[in-house]
Image (cartoon, rainbow, N blue to C red):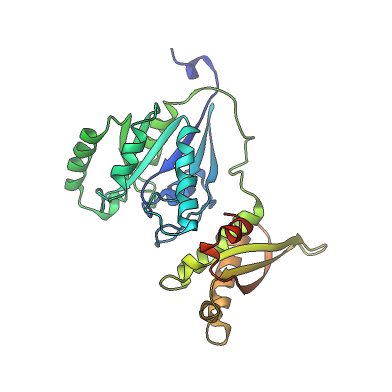
Amino acid sequence: MGPESRGKFLSGFVSIIGPPNVGKSTLLNRLIGKKISIVSPKPQTTRNRILGVYHGEGYQIVFIDTPGIHRTRTPLHRSMVASAQSTFQEVDVILLMIEMPRPNSPEISPIIKKIRRLNRPVVLAINKIDLGPKEKLLPIIDQFRERYPFAAIVPISALKGDGADLLLGELKSRLTEGPAFFPKGMETDQSETFLVSEVIREKVFKNAKKELPYSSAVTVERMEEASEGGLLNISAAINVERQSQKGILVGHRGKMIRKIGQAARYDLEGIFGTRVFLDLTIRVQKNWSRDTRALRRLGY
């Protein structure tokens, strides 16, 4: 008879790791049931460790969504990878994600090499099964069974939700008796200002082209409710590295910044359940992604 059958509460921490752009943030948002992590088709969009809480019947899973592990080029990238790797020692279960269209990304071998040194159960999730022919799935499963003794291998589509319940079941079965670390109804430990900055940054990623999003960081400077009318006033700055980038983000007659602001406001009103007035400005912080002092100032 397991601990759950005796009415005892189960809990644990799960780190979601993997190469960039395999769908870690999409999976976290899917499991939690709301947007708490930035989602973009561009790789390396998650810069901070995002903590999300899944409240099950008689159990709680605390997820840590990490930046994609990749080769480092700048102080920002080194900070992102160090953030991801530091979670390995802090969790009870590691959830490694790969994607079916690219099961042999060059980042996977170094990740497997690192997790071999840890005494942690590792569950493998093969994401984006909706993007490939089903006959390719079994060979990928067989390949990874030979590469590492995974506790379980679960094919999923984080975007569509396929396999999500099965994945939750596998993770739940590896929890141990413990407390509820967070109260019911609390889905993340991130502050409201952090969530606002991530929503705005997501819209920059979705609307700006090429390398510009990687040179941008968002700081929330003011966030307060109006005394009447239920309006949430938010002032935020998009920090870029060059004057030319500022011009691109402003766009012709302010078209780009309005597009980013409107999309962000729409999402924020859904998150906070109230009308939002969003004041966006663009500030030039020269070479901030390569300046360790600027990184600290901007929250990295």
Q: Nearer the viewer, residue 101 or 132?
A: 101
- Is the N terminus in the top left, top right, bottom left or bottom right quadrant? top left
> Residue 207, position in %: x, y?
47, 72
For the view shown, which residue lies furthest in the right direction?
Answer: 227
**Residue 146 visible in rendering:** yes
> Residue 27, position in %: x, y?
43, 47
> Residue 283, position in %: x, y?
62, 73
For the view shown, which residue lies furthest in the bottom direction?
Answer: 253
Seen at 62% across and 40% down, the residue is: 185
For the view shown, which residue lies furthest in the top direction?
Answer: 1
Compared to residue 90, the image places residue 288 above or below, namely below
Seen at 27% across and 33% down, the residue is: 148
Q: Left or right: 259 with respect to 71?
A: right
Q: Left or right: 62 with respect to 173?
A: right
**Residue 270 visible in rendering:** no
- Is the C terminus in the top left, top right, bottom left or bottom right quadrant? bottom right
Q: Nearer the viewer, residue 22 or 86?
A: 86
Q: Left or right: 72 with respect to 179?
A: left
> Residue 25, position in %: x, y?
45, 50
Seen at 47% across and 65% down, the residue is: 214
> What count of labels does the image hold?
0
